[in-house]
């Protein structure tokens, strides 16, 4: 961060006002000039004469870094960019196909910018110009959660995300938590042997942070044929993963002490347990339709989940109490799974929402999915249940206002037993039209559970959505949360984007009766370094209204806007997603 501040002081703010051309617009202008072409403003239906690629280096002459640094970067090969284009010369220019191609290109993690524009051709047609710019590929990726002086989480990933210029990812991982250190590696190939198949693997060894004794391992392996275009009929995924470790649940800097009561009084029992999770499954997807999509997935798998309290320092009664009241359910099952997704193929490219001037893809209109998992009994795995889950989302764009409503629910039905794992999550999210150069972003979310066999707990405070409260100050099985944030437009500082925010958060976590909410207010700084990341760095300082005097523990910093903190359940209520990106 210090080097960025130094550059800011030396470089200064570019005019103090937003440029008439954004970061991507300037690159498009550069790309057309490099090819000696003029933009065609009415290309629809014209034949594509040829396809050219205007690919800028990570550091261009307009960036605040010496261009000789490009020597240490594998520039993405032109063939890697070209193979994502979904049409050939001779095809007719189609806005829908162009937008889909851009979405494919933006899935290549090394590309900071990927745009496709039409230029005036020589024979009455158009020239398709792919304008791209790499991010720095040899990088020390980092993710962190900092609450005042307390570093709750730090991930350092020495990564080459563009090995040999082929968009392959090789990584060495270092993950620091309050109790453990994990060392691992990752390899991802989006186009295995030049095909549409994707392959990825990751594995880590986990060490105790104090003694550095090994405490477990984790990892995943996946092979898939992802759906990369709207007219691709078949997709497939097979994967396996494991997680073997000791789990310690922290509130702030200390392990959560649970109040155990017996005839001797109240005893503090540390929230600690051993985890064994192993899973393997496969899904085949058949995709139907073009304008209105229907994706049907089916498959099966098996898993082992075991959660055991430690034997040292606890009585048998305390261990039984932890299992019954606090730990996830130990379970082993084989299952068949089905998933149906319905949505219109209406996508828009928007900016100045989460990542300032960088392009973001949003599907508009309704989206619905329904899924089922049947765990069938066998002589060696007697678990028997039927899980049902569904999710509905509606997103509307009007007058520069983007509104999204999402609801997801699930239930587990068991022979001869009450329904379990009933969960309902709902979210409302709105980005207002721009005013005074910024936007008002409003989000409300509710998460409710009934007869939850996994005893899932919510901890609110600090970086978990209630800024200005103490770290993990509130706890419970359910929560209500609302965030209201005014985000300024971005200011260009030596090609970086800098923005500011004022926020109001209100929320509560509870188990039985709803508890009075906690209110916080504060201000924040947002930084985007497009040569390195597409997510903003978020730094917030908040205070609780009517609470204790604020200290450094109310300052938190991490990657991503506050609206990126949301339950995965809203998008994947059955938990069918894998750990590796497609």
Image (cartoon, rainbow, N blue to C red):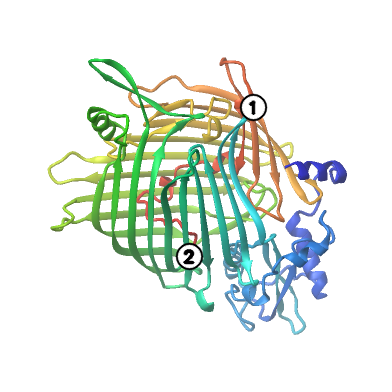
The answer for how far apart the CA atoms under marks 1 and 2 are is: 41 Å
The residue that label 1 is drawn on is 522
> Relative to 196, does residue 283 appear above or below in the rendering?
above
User: Residue 396 location in percent, x, y?
Assistant: 53, 48
User: Residue 392 location in percent, x, y?
Assistant: 40, 48
Residue 145 or 46: which is nearer the viewer?
A: 145
Residue 340 or 177: which is nearer the viewer?
A: 177
Q: Quadrant of residue 86?
A: bottom right
* Residue 312 appears anywhere in the view: yes
249 vs 422, left or right, is: right
Residue shown at the point (48%, 65%) measured from the top left: 200
Residue shown at the point (23%, 32%) measured from the top left: 320
The answer to which of marks 1 and 2 sits earlier in the sequence is 2
Q: Are marks 1 and 2 in contact (CB under 8 Å)?
A: no
For the residues carrying marks 1 and 2, which lies nearer the camera in this image?
A: 2
* Residue 17 appears anywhere in the view: no
The residue that label 2 is drawn on is 200
User: Residue 102 location in percent, x, y?
Assistant: 61, 65
> Relative to 439, does residue 113 appear above or below in the rendering?
below
Q: Quadrant of residue 476?
A: top left
Residue shown at the point (45%, 43%) measured from the top left: 567
> Relative to 133, does residue 153 appear above or below in the rendering?
above
Q: For mark 2, does the 10 Å Cα neighbourhood hold few (<14), some (14 to 19), or many (20 or more) residues?
A: many
Residue shown at the point (25%, 28%) measured from the top left: 315
User: Residue 58 location in percent, x, y?
Assistant: 74, 62
Tag 1 secondary structure: strand
């Amino acid at each position: 961060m210090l080097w960025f501040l130094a550059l800011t002081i030396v470089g200064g703010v570019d005019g103090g006002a937003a440029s008439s051309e954004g970061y991507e617009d300037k690159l498009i202008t550069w790309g057309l000039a490099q090819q000696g072409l003029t933009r065609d403003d009415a290309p629809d239906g014209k034949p594509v004469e040829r396809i050219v690629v205007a690919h800028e280096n990570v550091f261009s002459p307009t960036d605040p870094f010496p261009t000789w640094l490009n020597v240490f970067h594998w520039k993405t090969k032109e063939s890697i960019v070209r193979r994502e284009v979904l049409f050939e010369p001779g095809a007719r220019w189609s806005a829908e196909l162009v937008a889909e191609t851009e979405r494919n290109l933006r899935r290549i993690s090394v590309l900071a910018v990927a745009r496709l524009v039409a230029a005036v051709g020589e024979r009455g047609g158009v020239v398709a110009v792919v304008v791209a710019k790499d991010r720095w590929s040899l990088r020390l990726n980092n993710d962190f959660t900092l609450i005042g002086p307390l570093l709750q989480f730090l991930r350092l990933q020495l990564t080459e995300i563009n090995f040999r210029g082929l968009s392959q990812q090789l990584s060495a991982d270092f993950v620091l938590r309050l109790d453990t250190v994990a060392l691992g590696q990752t390899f991802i190939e989006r186009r295995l042997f030049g095909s549409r198949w994707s392959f990825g693997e990751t594995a880590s060894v986990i060490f105790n942070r104090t003694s550095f004794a090994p405490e477990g391992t984790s990892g995943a392996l996946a092979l898939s044929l992802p759906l990369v275009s709207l007219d691709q009929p078949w997709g497939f995924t097979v994967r396996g993963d494991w997680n073997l470790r000791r789990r310690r649940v922290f509130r702030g800097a200390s392990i959560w002490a649970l109040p155990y009561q017996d005839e001797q009084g109240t005893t503090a029992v540390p929230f600690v347990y051993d985890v064994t999770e192993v899973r393997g499954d496969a899904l085949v997807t058949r995709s139907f339709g073009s304008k209105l999509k229907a994706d049907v997935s089916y498959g099966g798998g098996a898993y082992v989940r075991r959660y055991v309290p430690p034997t040292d320092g606890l009585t048998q009664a305390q261990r039984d109490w932890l299992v019954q009241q606090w730990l996830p359910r130990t379970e082993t099952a084989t299952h068949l799974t089905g998933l149906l997704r319905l949505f219109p193929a209406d996508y828009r490219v928007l900016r100045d929402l989460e990542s300032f001037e960088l392009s973001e893809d949003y599907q508009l209109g309704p989206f619905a999915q329904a899924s089922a998992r049947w765990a069938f009994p066998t002589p060696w795995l007697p678990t028997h249940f039927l899980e049902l889950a569904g999710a509905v989302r509606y997103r509307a764009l009007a007058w520069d206002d983007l509104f999204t409503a999402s609801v997801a629910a699930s239930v587990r039905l068991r022979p001869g037993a009450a329904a379990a794992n009933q969960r309902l999550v709902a979210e409302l999210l709105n980005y207002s039209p721009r005013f005074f150069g910024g936007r008002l972003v409003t989000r409300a979310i509710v998460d409710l559970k009934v007869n939850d066999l996994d005893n899932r707990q919510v901890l609110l405070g600090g970086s978990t959505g209630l800024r200005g409260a103490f770290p993990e100050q509130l706890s419970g099985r359910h929560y209500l949360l609302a965030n209201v944030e005014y985000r300024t437009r971005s200011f260009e500082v030596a090609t970086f984007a800098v923005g500011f925010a004022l926020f109001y958060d209100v929320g509560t976590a509870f188990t039985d009766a709803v508890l009075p909410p906690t209110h916080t207010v504060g201000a924040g700084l947002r930084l985007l370094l497009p040569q390195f990341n597409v997510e903003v760095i978020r730094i917030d300082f908040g205070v609780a209204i009517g609470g204790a005097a604020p200290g450094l523990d109310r300052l938190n910093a991490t990657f991503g806007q506050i609206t990126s903190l949301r339950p995965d359940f809203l998008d994947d209520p059955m938990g069918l997603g894998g750990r590796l990106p497609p």
